[in-house]
């Protein structure tokens, strides 16, 4: 925001490190919290009689604190490892913010063992949380589909769809950005994909969650039907 206002592309070394740390911190914290929320949905739908005893205010506070602490340690490890490498291929990043792949391109170090270890840790964390979320929703859908009344099924699904939409949006945008083939890599494509995962999910999250508000839902529906009638 500062660079946009002052029409500059410069950033300090410490500022780049801080930017990378907070980027990783907020993305990983959101992902961990979404994992915790899937457990909350599972308990509220599959084991409602035990919900109050197993997920009280103290338990929720502990799970939230664990998510934030894990994100902090994960981001600190990645940032410390990335900026411990010597940079000898200039100081220009082909990106509008400090991102690990772009910083590693400037490194002249041949020691990628630590980065490989952190990459393995990242894959394990991402896959572990994803499997946990999928398992939770498989159990949820099995229980919901056995609810006899249509109104009950609709109410149960409505509590999950917003969370599931946010999870799908975050995972799909990050996966597209980081799992593309190397042959497709180009500065313009990397820039577009970075905008996709760093801007689109935060911009759409408030809208997705606020659609539970009936007044906003009615306003969006009127806007959509009004536009379709005009066309």
Image (tube, grey):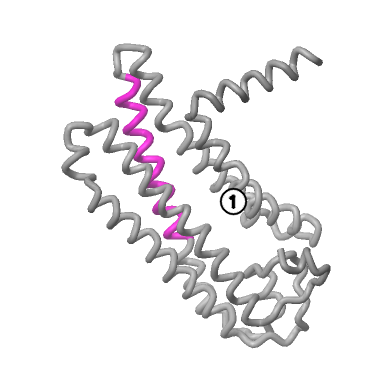
Q: Is residue 184 visible?
A: no
Q: Is residue 141 magenta?
A: yes
Q: Residue at x 32, y 12 (%)?
A: 149
The answer to whether residue 56 is above or below residue 106 is above
Q: Is residue 73 magenta?
A: no
Q: Residue at x 50, y 24 (%)?
A: 214
Tell me which segment is drawn in magenta: 123-145
Is residue 66 rendered to the left or right of residue 168? Answer: left
Find residue 229 and report its horizontal and vertical position in percent: 75, 12
The answer to whether residue 192 is above or below residue 52 is below
Find residue 218 and report its horizontal and vertical position in percent: 57, 21
Is residue 167 rendered to the left or right of residue 52? Answer: right
The answer to whether residue 46 is above or below residue 10 is above
Tell me the residue that label 1 is attached to: 175
Q: Residue at x 65, y 47 (%)?
A: 200
Q: Relative to the observer, which residue lies in front, 172 or 117?
A: 172
Question: How busy is the neighbourhood of tag 1: few (under 14 within 10 Å), some, or many (20 plus)?
Answer: few
In which quarter of the view is residue 187 placed?
bottom right
Q: How many marks?
A: 1
Q: Residue at x 16, y 42 (%)?
A: 53
Q: Secondary structure at mark 1?
A: helix
Quadrant, the N terminus: bottom right
In which quarter of the view is residue 54 placed?
top left
Quadrant, the C terminus: top right
Q: Is residue 100 visible?
A: yes
Magenta segment main secondary structure: helix
The answer to whether residue 144 is above or below residue 38 is above
Find residue 69 and report its horizontal and vertical position in percent: 38, 66
Is residue 27 rendered to the left or right of residue 64? Answer: right
């Amino acid at each position: 925001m500062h660079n946009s206002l002052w029409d500059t592309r410069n950033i300090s070394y410490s500022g780049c490190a801080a930017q990378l740390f907070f980027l990783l911190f907020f993305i990983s914290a959101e992902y961990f919290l979404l994992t915790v929320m899937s457990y909350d949905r599972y308990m509220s739908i599959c084991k409602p009689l035990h919900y109050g005893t197993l997920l009280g205010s103290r338990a929720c506070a502990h799970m939230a604190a664990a998510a934030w602490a894990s994100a902090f340690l994960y981001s600190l490890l990645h940032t410390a490892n990335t900026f411990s490498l010597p940079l000898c291929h200039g100081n220009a990043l082909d990106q509008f913010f400090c991102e690990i792949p772009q910083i590693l391109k400037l490194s002249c170090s041949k020691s990628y063992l630590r980065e490989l270890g952190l990459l393995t840790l990242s894959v394990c964390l991402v896959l572990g949380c994803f499997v946990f979320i999928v398992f939770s929703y498989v159990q949820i859908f099995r229980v919901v589909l056995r609810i006899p009344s249509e109104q009950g099924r609709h109410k149960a699904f409505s509590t999950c769809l917003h969370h599931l939409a946010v999870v799908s949006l975050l995972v799909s945008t990050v996966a597209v950005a980081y799992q593309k083939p190397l042959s497709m890599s180009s500065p313009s494509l990397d820039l577009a994909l970075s905008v996709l995962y760093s801007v689109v999910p935060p911009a759409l999250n408030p809208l997705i969650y606020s659609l539970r508000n009936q007044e906003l839902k009615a306003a969006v529906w009127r806007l959509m039907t009004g536009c379709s009638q005009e066309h």
